[in-house]
Image (spheres, rainbow, N blue to C red):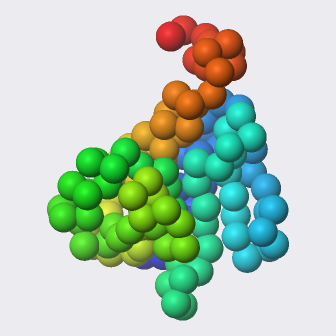
Amino acid sequence: MDSKTLQACAQNVALELPFTEHCWPFGPEYDVFKVGGKIFMLMGVAHGRLHVSLKSDPQTSLLNQQIYRSIEPGYHLNKKHWISVYAGDDISPGLIADLVNDSWNLVVDKLPKRTQKQMRPGA
């Protein structure tokens, strides 16, 4: 998957998730996606490479970094809880969808129970 497709795919998945807010609090060079006022995804450029940074469970993060060479510790973020995904042949739309959904759910899981019920009405 190339860089533009990576970011377009991640953005499409994120914007389909309920209560997602797309904003630019760090300037126009960083696309930020929030749920419940908390960031779950950032898109930008690091060292000349487009990337998508996502919240990740620490154990899952380490496993994904071992499996996929295009997944690295979060660029300019907490390396334990964030990953950055770069373009690569090992990245698929399905993987991106899973990573974005996991990130959204990790953030929602930390919100107050009442807010969680509003965001996940069937849960």
Q: Position of residue 89 (x, y in %)?
A: 27, 72
Please name the residue shown 81% across and 62% down the image. Answer: 25
Q: Look at the image and tell me whether residue 9 can be seen.
A: no
Is residue 90 toward the left or the right of residue 53 in the image? left
- When asked about the image quadrant of residue 11, the answer is bottom right
Residue closest to the eye, 110 or 31: 110
Q: Quadrant of the N terminus?
A: bottom left
- When asked about the image quadrant of residue 88, the answer is bottom left
Residue closest to the eye, 51 or 115: 115
Please name the residue shown 52% across and 28% down the image. Answer: 109
Q: Position of residue 93 (x, y in %)?
A: 39, 54
Q: Look at the image and tell me whether residue 116 can be seen.
A: yes
Residue closest to the eye, 102 or 96: 102
Please name the residue shown 53% across and 66% down the image. Answer: 77
In this rendering, is residue 13 above or below 106?
below
Please name the residue shown 49% across and 55% down the image. Answer: 54
In this rendering, is residue 108 above or below 20?
above
Q: Position of residue 108 (x, y in %)?
A: 57, 31
